[in-house]
């Protein structure tokens, strides 16, 4: 079972040479930060690389400079298909302009037997939120396998069930867990910055219930809020001394230099076990 790219040439460059040139530029411009923890998870944006690529690259580079992972679980929100629960891509390979990457079947096989996971690879076909993460993994952590998880509508008990299962498997197989998410979406740069500051602060508090409550009230905003809630619950279930670090923040208005029109916020956040 092979998934071919749907968004190369639009969200990100369509050829290997173009991707490598862009990544080489990101390498020169990347943001660095002193992080005194062993990475175990992160939040990474999924917009077009011209908008959020440097934030994503910097986050992955910081993670993989400290530790390489054989397995990476990616929780991406569903923008195109409605579903309840989490849709698996169970086996095979995904393809990008950088080549093929294998699915981690040692993780996906047990997930087939657990709720709220559903074996629905067809729901992944048009989605960009996971696809755009893959070239970063191939370039910076080239020997890893992936677990693509498309996140749909879920209540708190479903989130907790999913997180418990993923915590167990991530610990058993030493997997990195990534929540793919942009932040504020709207028409005010000022409101974007204010809302994103609240969202990031709430995430870094590592309190999943508070995050979910504030998201329900519109006090914080993230298109991948359910994936973030799953990740925060995973961190709680791992029972480690976890700390979150904001590596980089920007938004589309600051990237383009235009403060008018539609604005989207982007943050790169790393979670690690304190040493």
Image (cartoon, rainbow, N blue to C red):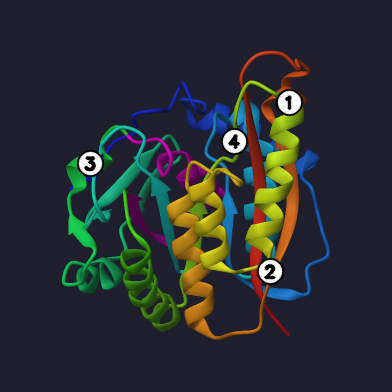
Q: Which mark is residue 20?
A: 4
Q: Nearer the viewer, residue 270 or 188?
A: 188
Residue 149 inside the magenta-drawn segment: yes
Q: Position of residue 64 (x, y in %)?
A: 63, 62
Tell me whether circle 4 and circle 3 mark residues in contact (CB < 8 Å).
no
- Between circles 4 and 2, the one closer to the viewer is 2
User: Mark 1 to mark 4: distance in Å?
Assistant: 32 Å
Name the residue at 46% across, 25% down: 14
Query: Which quadrant of the figure contains the C terminus?
Result: bottom right
**Of labels 3 and 2, the one closer to you:** 3
| Residue for badge 1 | 189
> Residue 175 in the image: x percent, y percent?
46, 71
Q: Which residues are magenta?
A: 127-151
Label 3 or label 1, whichever comes before in sequence order:
3
Q: CA distance from mark 4 to mark 2?
A: 22 Å
Residue that sits furthest to the front in the current view: 217
Please tell me which of labels 4 and 2 falls first in the chain: 4
Where disc 3 sits, the SS reads helix
Marker disc for residue 123: 3
Name the residue located 55 percent from the left edge and 43 percent from the top edge: 218
């Amino acid at each position: 079972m092979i998934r071919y790219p749907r968004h190369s040439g639009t969200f990100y460059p369509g050829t290997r040479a173009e991707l490598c040139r862009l990544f080489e530029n990101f390498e020169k411009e990347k943001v660095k930060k002193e992080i005194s923890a062993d990475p175990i998870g992160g939040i990474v944006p999924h917009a077009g690389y011209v908008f959020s690529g440097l934030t994503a690259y910097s986050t992955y580079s910081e993670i993989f400079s400290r530790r390489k992972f054989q397995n990476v679980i990616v929780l991406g929100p569903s923008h195109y298909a409605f579903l309840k629960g989490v849709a698996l891509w169970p086996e095979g390979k995904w393809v990008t302009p950088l080549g093929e990457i294998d699915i981690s079947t040692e993780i996906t096989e047990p997930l087939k037997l657990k709720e709220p996971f559903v074996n629905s690879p067809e729901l992944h076909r048009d989605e960009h939120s996971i696809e755009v993460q893959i070239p970063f993994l191939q370039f910076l952590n080239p020997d890893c396998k992936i677990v693509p998880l498309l996140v749909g509508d879920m209540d708190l008990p479903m989130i907790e069930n999913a997180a418990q299962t993923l915590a167990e498997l991530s610990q058993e197989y030493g997997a990195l867990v990534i929540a793919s998410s942009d932040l504020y979406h709207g028409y005010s740069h000022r409101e974007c910055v204010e809302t994103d500051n609240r969202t990031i602060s709430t995430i870094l508090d590592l309190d999943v219930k508070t995050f979910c409550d504030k998201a329900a009230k519109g006090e914080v905003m993230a298109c991948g809020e359910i994936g973030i809630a799953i990740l925060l619950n995973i961190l709680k279930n791992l029972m480690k001394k976890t700390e979150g670090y904001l590596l980089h923040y920007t938004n589309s208005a600051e990237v383009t230099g235009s403060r008018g029109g539609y604005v989207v916020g982007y943050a790169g956040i790393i979670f690690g076990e304190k040493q």
